[in-house]
Amino acid sequence: MEKERKTIDLKVIFPILWSRRKLFFKVIPVVFILSVLYIFPQPRYYRAEVSLAPEASGTEIGGGLASIASSFGFNLGSMAGSDAIYPMLYPELFESPEFLVSLLGIQIRTLDGEIECDYYTYLKKYQEKNPYTKPLKSVSRWIKNLFTPKKQEGGDGAINAFHMSEDDYGLVMGMQDKIVCTNDKRTDVTTIKVEAQDALVCALLADSISSRLQNYIIKYRTSKARLDLEYYQQLSDSALAEYVTAAALYSNYCDANKNMTKQSILTRKDQLQTDMELKSATYQAYQAQVQAMKSKVQEKTPAFTVLKSSTVPVKPAGPKRVLFVLAMCFLSCVVLSLWLCRKELHLTF
């Protein structure tokens, strides 16, 4: 047997709601006042963003296949390279506590010029809060501290990413809501969005975080080449020292045995000259490797194109106070309507 479909008879619903309309006139003003009291003291925040297009690494896959994959939201070109960190993984980097902690040392200043400090101090001491919710948070924190042991607090900016206190961990995790990185899989464009209570602060943070991300990727992409360069530079320096010693020894021997025709002296002179020439050839070979490694470091250094630079926002991004109040009033009407018509709608609360 087919189950009977439950239908909503509006001819039954509307009379019920109309008969209880006075209840709506009581509930909606209360919700309106509570919403206004909650949302209007909330501090405003601003948002700035930077868009980067990193240079593709590795070999590109055929244009036809790549374009087909792009239409489905995949960028095969970025995944074809040998890099472990490609643009699709940049957002994962922003979830790393180590990377987030490194951002706390960024120097910022507010638009009015009254505050100039590092980002850690700004988050710790200069965040505006809703005066109505602040007492509730203080009470809940006091109750929580009664049942938990006291945590060690680090100094300004002195957070150990490996072993953080509970307060510092909450502060760092809260940064994930204020600093967001997204990557467009189809275009490989990376967008960094930063939120702060001051317009200049969020613009400075967006610009600094963009630079730090670029430096981090450059350091990673060139790490192997720089290690090779350092290794060959050490060999070259050592070979140069040996060549200088051999050349000095050969020169001193020649000066000391000038106009000598004894065979033993001439043989020793030839040995020293051969040793000096070998040391010179070794030094030149290592120098060629050093120059090659310098070229490789330059080749491995990625270029970033800034598609959208950071600018100081003129208008705040939120909170959307009017929309919030209207949404709360509408939601209260919906909930109250469902409650009044729960029997007709076969709802159980």
Image (cartoon, rainbow, N blue to C red):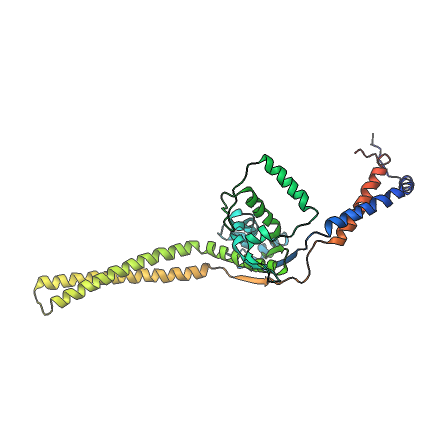
Name the quadrant of the C terminus.
top right
Q: Nearer the viewer, residue 200 or 273?
A: 200
Name the quadrant of the N terminus.
top right
Q: Nearer the viewer, residue 345 or 39?
A: 39
Horizontal side of residue 45 vs 100, given as left or right: right
- Residue 289 vs 4, above or below: the answer is below
Place residue 247 in its image quadrant: bottom left
Residue pictured at 38% horizontal, 55% vertical: 228
Q: Nearer the viewer, residue 60 or 133?
A: 133
Residue pictured at 34% horizontal, 62% vertical: 288
Across and down, in percent, residue 198 comes to 63, 58
How many numbered markers are drawn? Answer: 0
The residue furthest top is 1
Residue pictured at 79% horizontal, 48% vertical: 33
The residue furthest left is 262
- Residue 281 vs 325, above or below: the answer is below
Across and down, in percent, residue 290 comes to 36, 60
Horizontal side of residue 307 vs 268, given as left or right: right
- Residue 146 vs 249, above or below: the answer is above
Across and down, in percent, residue 78 comes to 54, 54
Residue pictured at 69% horizontal, 61% vertical: 315
Q: Nearer the viewer, residue 109 or 298?
A: 109
Judge whether residue 133 can be spotted in this image. Answer: yes
The residue furthest bottom is 259
Judge whether residue 185 can be spotted in this image. Answer: no
Across and down, in percent, residue 170 comes to 58, 44
Place residue 135 in its image quadrant: top right
